[in-house]
Image (cartoon, coloured by chain):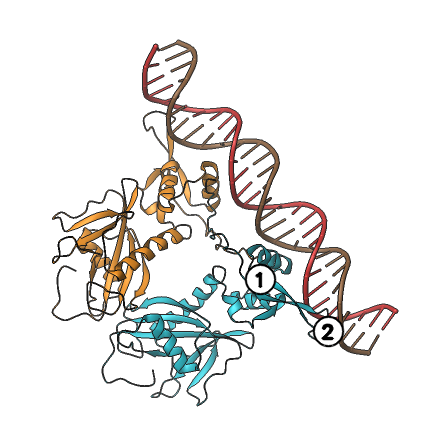
Chain colours: A orange, B cyan, C red, D brown
Amino acid sequence: MPERRTRKPPYTIDVVLLTPVRGQLAVLLCRVPEGRDKWTLPWEGPRTGEALDAAAGRITKSVLGEDAVWREQIGAFGDGKRHPSDTEISVGFVGLVPMGTPSPVGGVYAWFPIADIPQLAPRQRQLLDSAISMVRTRMDQSPVAFRLLPQMFTLTELQQMYEFLLARRLHKASFRRALHGAWLVEPTDEWRSEGRGRPAQLYRYAPRKRRPAQRGIRLDFMS
Amino acid sequence: MPERRTRKPPYTIDVVLLTPVRGQLAVLLCRVPEGRDKWTLPWEGPRTGEALDAAAGRITKSVLGEDAVWREQIGAFGDGKRHPSDTEISVGFVGLVPMGTPSPVGGVYAWFPIADIPQLAPRQRQLLDSAISMVRTRMDQSPVAFRLLPQMFTLTELQQMYEFLLARRLHKASFRRALHGAWLVEPTDEWRSEGRGRPAQLYRYAPRKRRPAQRGIRLDFMS
DNA sequence: CGAATTAGTCACCAATCGTAACTAATGTCA
DNA sequence: TGACATTAGTTACGATTGGTGACTAATTCG
């Protein structure tokens, strides 16, 4: 996106990349070349014949060197709100990046905690808000939290990741019951001693069966 | 969409309009002028300065004379699949239309039951599938079913609408318990006698309080 | 009248949830 | 070494919610 094209693209692809940084969700922003404290989400125009999802992956790789571990389209945003490009619409994507991923050097990119975002173009601000709420709602339908952890992890680490992403405290016993009920994890025979206290067993992500479709208003189907 | 533009638009807005027809969900399609049995979703290019959602409303009105009673964006579709236009992407919308809405005369438009859809361009086929699954998943988060009924309705009618949209049978007692628990409806003092059997009380849609956020894996929050 | 039909409720049991209290295994420090 | 703090993991139990059949209620039809 710092690279400017000679012709205005028909639309842009904007990517919201999120990662945990010091106990907070953080988003990757890029310094706008013109203007001193102006920031933007990573974005680019499409290439011909390229799928939308592939374009989002390409942009992520060009910015971080690696693709995100999970990605989903948020939707198309337009509605007359301003954007760094002059295009009428942008297609937004959210991506999650494992914790500890370094932001590229050069002072052009930086991670901003979501509680402390600098001013963005209105369309991008709207896009970012949708991205965060999409991650939260996808949390229990899609194994998002696992993607941010190493292959093996303790259940306490997993719970902390859930708490982190949901921004809510969870009950230990209930969390484990729900987890085992969903058949998402499998214990290994390794244990990790983390300073003081009893060592924790390590688990790996190993989904066993489809978990039942989630219900909102809780309608009861016939048998 | 039958009207052709002189210049190719940067993208299209495609609208999936759904309504109940004879016990089935049906989608509105438009006959392609060229080609004898080719059909397409209603679509058009954007107008400058027009919000995406407004454009979807405009297209709906231009096709049916009325706007949909509920509408939501599905997302942007591209991924190299073919589309009646030559554009690289389309922004899809789903809309629900009250039952009994006549399809416009002229033989250009027709309602097709979703079990029996003629061949569509691949991108539109994908869009239609997403539209149907979006309606189903939004059912219990958003009061969709009420929009397809008259202002006053019996609980049996409401249950049938849910069963219809979800394509599943529901249990009467549980349905009513869930409904009352969600504080979505309010009884009126009118009754309707529908031939044989006890008359049914009429209800109206009157949401009282926010129903709690739906949970999928059922994590238990701390108090 | 009684049978059929549709509306609406109740009651019971099973499953799940929310929570506190418990056991277990380690490190720390007197 | 032994008491204690600390973290992991389990158990148990009352409360709530869910699934279901059977019940009562009000009407039409013959």
Note whether residue A9 is visible: yes
- Residue at 34% across, 66% down: B75
**Do we see residue B119 in this rendering?**
no
Q: Is residue B105 left or right of residue B157?
A: left
Q: Vertical placement of A88 versus A66: above or below?
A: below
Report crowding for label 2: few under 14, some 14 to 19, many 20 or more residues within 10 A (C-alpha): few
Q: CA distance from mark 1 to mark 2?
A: 25 Å
Q: Is residue A67 above or below residue B162?
A: above
Residue B156 percent across, percent down from the top left: 63, 67
Q: In the rendered image of this protein, does residue C16 appear above or below residue A213?
A: above
**Callout 2: SS:** loop
Q: Nearer the viewer, mark 1 or mark 2?
A: 1
Find residue B174 and name its label. Answer: none
Identify the residue position indicated by label 2 in the image: B196
Q: How many marks?
A: 2
* Residue ID for mark 1: B185
Q: Which residue: 61% across, 56% down?
A: B177
Residue B206 percent location from the top left of the image: 55, 63
Q: Chain of mark 1?
A: B
Instruction: Tell me where residue D3 appears, x and y as whole percent.
Output: 43, 13
Q: Residue furthest bottom?
A: B106
For badge 2, the amino acid type reads: Arg
Look at 30% across and 65% down and name the residue there: A77
Mark 1 secondary-structure assignment: strand
Relative placement, left or right, of B152 versus A31 is: right
Instruction: Identify the amino acid type marked 1.
Output: Val
Residue B166 in the image: x percent, y percent? Answer: 52, 65
Task: Indicate the quadrant where residue B74 lies.
Answer: bottom left
Q: Nearer the viewer, residue B65 or D5?
A: B65
Q: Is residue C28 left or right of residue A82?
A: right
Asked if marks 1 and 2 fall on the same chain, the answer is yes
